[in-house]
Image: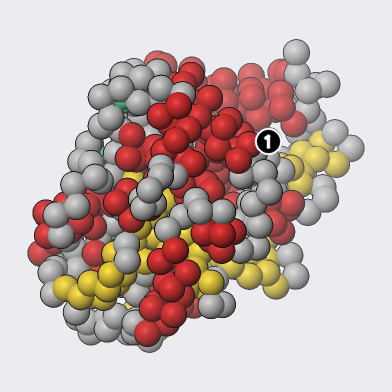
Amino acid sequence: MIQFILNNRLVETDKKPGMSLLDYIRYEVGLPGTKVGCREGDCGACTVLIGELNNNKVDYKSIVSCLTPLVNVHGKHVVTIEGINLENDLTPVQKAMAENAATQCGFCTPGFVMSFTGFCMNHEKPTTSRAIESVAGNICRCTGYKSIQRAAEDITRLMQDKDIKNPVDWLVSKGYLPKYFLSIPDKLAEIHSKTEIPNNSEITVAGGTDLMVQKSDIVYESTIRPTKEIEHLQKIKFENQTCIIGGAATVTSLLQTEKLLQSIDGLRDYLMLVSSEPVRNIATIAGNIVNASPIADLSIMLLALNAQISSEIDGKVNTQPLDQLYTGYKQLKLQKGELITEIRFELPNANQQFNFEKVSKRQYLDIASVNSAMVIKVENNTITDCRISAGGVAPIPLYLQETSQFLIGKKISEQLFDEANDVMQNEISPIGDVRGTVEYKRLLLKQLLFAHFAKLFPDKMN
Ligand SMILES: Cc1cc2nc3c(=O)[nH]c(=O)nc-3n(C[C@H](O)[C@H](O)[C@H](O)COP(=O)(O)OP(=O)(O)OC[C@H]3O[C@@H](n4cnc5c(N)ncnc54)[C@H](O)[C@@H]3O)c2cc1C
Ligand code: FES
Ligand code: FES
């Protein structure tokens, strides 16, 4: 049985663990405020909030319900648009949307309202830019974004005095959230927080943001091993300069790890280019690696960082370099059922620099046409260490071994860039597809290599 609190009532269901939360909400419970748009995580019409008990308080975040299998909300509080309604008034978010004429046909509006409500309920200092980032995963086809932006500004103003330690209590005390939210921590504490993981599960599911797009029918029919239920996989820790990330850590949890952001220049901006907030809130690092998409952003960053991957099967632990993991398109050196437990890498030291570049058709909520990362160490103007990776130019996320080796021992100059590009062009094998022709992708990667050098060594590149 899967148990969770849906708005203000406990639900218990024997529906399949792989059913999407969206279908459950709309078609089993009959709450039609949550909309079905793309079913691919792209439009945000299905956005709901999910609350998790943490030290007697509940932390809320937005998620896309179309890609969330039911099993992943076991023991949680799910809030739909119906669950935030006040008795006699609109909530501040609903009011700001109405007063700024930020809605026309209204189809996208519940999604926007839930994303903005997630922004009001988070533990961060409210700023307009964060309010706008919170709806980066919501698409509106008819209103126009200016009025939604004005609503974001109004909401941010109202949140200025928010108690970021206890946002829920504060919102209830101001009459901005219904009172039943105060009873949720006790109710959640009563639910068994863990589901039993079947011994012989047919499929491992983490956030579901790849699986539910590509194989939702298989997920629906299968017995599932949810990695969210395996506690040690969620952790991010440091042993001296080594960063160790549990396989089920989400992109958002990386964004919330201050030491990581401080150690890798620009990392926050790079991670903000990965999908959108409600997807980042559930998408995991191991899911990004195992999906084996040739343009997976995290895998590209981790290849440059020389990450080592630990996995487990039948009690046996294997560790291998990420650059040895991929053997062909969507082929990995992992056995069926093998679980990625840890990803570890050395944080760049004072002499090393990191850079990531991504080109996509739009800046946010888009996958890359071509992406690339570089870690480089330069002493006395000579490159003493270098690792460059590239996505979208081969059947796998590619470590550019020959180009990286070629650069070591050389002095940085524009001529060196041209020579390195010649080596690199022989090392890649892009194919033409919807994201561009072969020639275009070759040119893009050349530009990204230039961008790495121009950004890190502006005085050496014209
Ligand atoms: C709208 C949208 C936008 C996106 N944008 C981006 C983007 O900008 N950049 C990007 O890189 N990706 C993007 N993605 C792809 C996706 O979100 C990421 O690849 C994500 O990291 C996948 O993680 P997950 O936890 O959701 O994986 P899941 O879908 O749960 O799993 C993916 C695969 O990994 C396996 N798996 C998961 N965890 C483990 C484990 N611990 N051990 C072994 N196998 C495991 C699963 O069995 C499955 O085969 C986007 C997806 C969507 C829907
Ligand atoms: S239906 Fe479009 S994001 Fe879920
Ligand atoms: S109001 Fe019509 S899609 Fe946004």
- How packed mark 1 is, by other alpha carbons closer than 10 Å (few <14, some 14-19, many 20 or more), is many
Q: Which residue is mark 1?
A: 407
| Residue 229 in picture, x, y percent from top left | 37, 75
The quadrant of the rendering that contains the N terminus is bottom left
| Residue 112 in picture, x, y percent from top left | 39, 37
Secondary structure under tag 1 reads helix
The quadrant of the rendering that contains the C terminus is top right
State the residue in front, 353 or 75. Answer: 75
| Residue 170 in picture, x, y percent from top left | 59, 59
Q: Is residue 87 left or right of residue 29?
A: right
- Toward which corner of the image does residue 41 lie, by quadrant? top left
Q: Amino acid at mark 1?
A: Leu
Q: Residue drawn 60% across and 27% down?
A: 449
Farthest top residue? 462
The answer, for residue 167, to whether it is visible in the render is no
Compared to 187, does 37 lie above or below?
above
Q: Is residue 378 left or right of residue 340?
A: right
The answer, for residue 185, to whether it is visible in the render is yes
Farthest front residue? 88
Compared to 383, does 324 lie above or below?
below
Q: Is residue 253 left or right of residue 28?
A: right
- Toward which corner of the image does residue 111 lie, by quadrant? top left
Compared to 394, does 87 lie above or below?
below
Q: Is residue 199 left or right of residue 60?
A: left
| Residue 293 in picture, x, y percent from top left | 35, 44
Q: Residue drawn 40% across and 66% down?
A: 180
Mark 1 residue CB less than 8 A from any atom of ligand 1: no
Q: Residue drawn 65% across and 63% down?
A: 165
